[in-house]
Amino acid sequence: MTTVHNERTRPQSPSFDLTRKRVVVIGGKTGIGLGVAQAAHAAGASVTVASRRSASVAGHPELAPFEQIRLDISDEEAVRAAFDAIGTLDHLVVVAGPTDGSWGTFMDDDMRGVRSYIDSKFLGSWACARHASPRLPPNGSITFLTGGIAARPKVGMTSVTSAFAAVEALGRSLALELGPIRVNTIRPGFIDTDFWTFLSEADAAAVREKVRAGFPARRLGQPGDVGHAAVFLMTNPYVTGTVLDVTGGEHLVDWVF
Ligand SMILES: NC(=O)c1ccc[n+]([C@@H]2O[C@H](COP(=O)([O-])OP(=O)(O)OC[C@H]3O[C@@H](n4cnc5c(N)ncnc54)[C@H](OP(=O)(O)O)[C@@H]3O)[C@@H](O)[C@H]2O)c1
């Protein structure tokens, strides 16, 4: 007897397949973004990575599988021109954000640090989504990236908390406005990248030890963990408007630094 399925009963096998898909990762040449680019490539996508640096493949063989673009996302005209040059794509992931500590504190008289942080992280994410979305298909997606501090503020980090929270709100708002294109945000916890070089070696080692001992997952988060989550968000057709914690359980325990 042949079984006739309707939409509800038709068996669906979960797919992480990105064959013949084009994925653009902004901030994809290092750290978390590189982990996302590598995961998308492993899932079959052709991947373009964009950021301000120009990195030679001879010096950075890890970038060999990717098309590279130079782009500063705080410059909206440059973002527009980059997406004109890119043309059509299937999935956009915006990981980029300042990591040099120049974000400015709340009581600074000079608000340049705050403006520059927001220009880059929030308005940069906005501009990338704005100029990519007309080139995305109905089953395409946009994924933003923030951090745990979006939900659990830390003294001295008000600019970062505010910018991250704004990016998450942007994600929810665009999920409504751009649907059926799906829009989500990944909120990572500690991920072992060069980001942590702002700490002394001894302090960074102490943070890593606390993460291993104190986070429920009992391990250091890796860029590939975020990459895995990003591929899930690109391929699951029913997840939109959400914030996905990829934290090893960091959000359940006290801050470690
Ligand atoms: N590592 C963690 O534990 C952690 C935790 C939570 C959140 N985050 C967030 O995750 C994001 C990525 O951090 P990461 O750890 O992967 O460090 P990272 O390797 O330093 O990544 C930052 C990336 O953003 C790019 N970028 C910065 N400003 C840009 C701009 N104006 N235009 C284009 N690209 C720009 C950088 O490339 P260029 O220098 O070539 O432009 C770099 O590839 C950051 O927003 C960070 O705040 C990190």
Image (tube, rainbow, N blue to C red):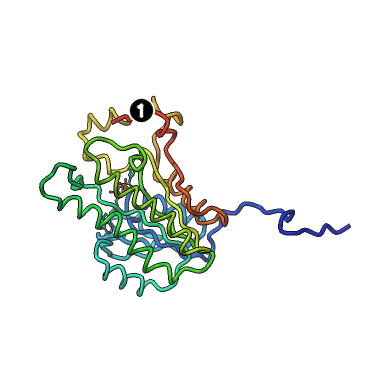
Q: Position of residue 225 (x, y in %)?
A: 44, 43
Q: Which quadrant does the N terminus fall into?
A: bottom right
Q: Which quadrant does the C terminus fall into?
A: top left
Name which quarter of the figure residue 23 lies in: bottom left
Residue 241 vertical placement versus 74 (above, below) = above
Amino acid type indicated by mark 1: Asp
Residue pictured at 62% horizontal, 51% vertical: 14
Q: Is residue 219 left or right of residue 70?
A: right
Name which quarter of the figure residue 131 lies in: bottom left
Residue pictured at 24% horizontal, 35% vertical: 155
Q: Position of residue 235 (x, y in %)?
A: 54, 56
Mark 1 = which residue? 254
Residue 196 vertical placement versus 40 (above, below) = above
Which residue is more in the foreground, 88 or 65?
88
SS type, badge 1:
loop
Q: Position of residue 123 (x, y in %)?
A: 29, 59
Residue 52 vertical placement versus 192 (above, below) = below
